Amino acid sequence: MSGRRPPKPVLAAVVLAVVSAIVWFGFLRDGEVGDELMAFGTVEATEGQLAFQAAGRIQAIGAREGDRVTTGQELASLDRSELNARRAQLVAQLAVERAGLAELQSGFRAEEIAQGRAALRAAEEQVGDAERDLERTALLHDGGAVSMEALEKSEFALSLSRIQADERREALGLLEAGPRPERVTAQAAQVA
């Protein structure tokens, strides 16, 4: 052999034949494009973004550059001290909400109701005193012993004592009825 190169048209024909064979056997099957393409190589990621479900400071990093990682492997972890403090705060708040619900469900204490009854009795006695004072003042006014202003003050005192007695009566009614069902339901929703 003289070491001569084959002519360019022959070389082009050989290259074209090889490429055609690769395309024919590698990519086309029965006239259709194949489903898979197999390739070998190295994939290099130059940048990656990680996200946590909650904000916080990173406590530890589990994988470094160049390490092999698998699906589900922990790459980094957050400092849990803030999360634990928040959890403790929520647990305490839940205890307060549960105590509030229990208080609403049990209603007012017997001592509170007794206090309301005593306040109503005192207000009713004041009404009686104001009525007696008005009767005396009216008699004295009719006899000319006191002025019209004194009579009006006695009438005003009676009116005021009746209003206070009505307020005490309504307050006792609320104590005896207990908390509204809507408040109990709202507090139960807070607990839930």
Image (cartoon, helix red, strand yellow):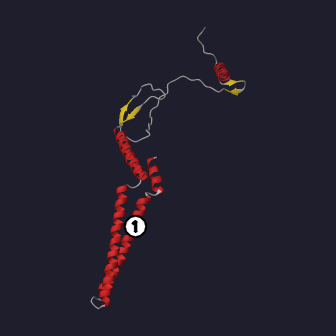
> Seen in the image, is 177 located left or right of residue 136?
right
Q: Vertically, is 108 above or below 65?
A: below
Label 1 residue SS: helix
Which of 30/122 is in front? 122
Circle 1 sits on which residue?
A: 169
Q: Vertically, is 50 above or below 9?
A: below
Which of 85/123 is in front? 123
Q: Residue 190: image x %, image y %? A: 44, 50
Q: Which residue lies at the image location 46% right of the left edge and 58% below the top edge?
A: 180
> Badge 1, how many Cα within 10 Å: few under 14, some, many 20+?
some
> Seen in the image, is 101 located left or right of residue 146?
right
Q: Vertically, is 138 above or below 22?
A: below
Furthest residue toward top: 1
Furthest residue toward right: 30
Q: If the image is split into quadrants, where does the N terminus sit?
A: top right
Q: Residue 81: image x %, image y %? A: 34, 38
> Seen in the image, is 177 located left or right of residue 122?
right
Which of 101/90 is in front? 101
Q: Which residue lies at the image location 44% right of the left edge and 59% below the top edge?
A: 177
Furthest residue toward left: 145
Q: How many marks?
A: 1
**Residue 129 appears in view:** yes
Q: Residue 12: image x %, image y %? A: 64, 21
Which of 95/74 is in front? 95
Q: Which residue lies at the image location 42% right of the left edge and 51% below the top edge?
A: 106
Q: Amino acid at mark 1?
A: Arg
**Residue 157 appears in view:** no
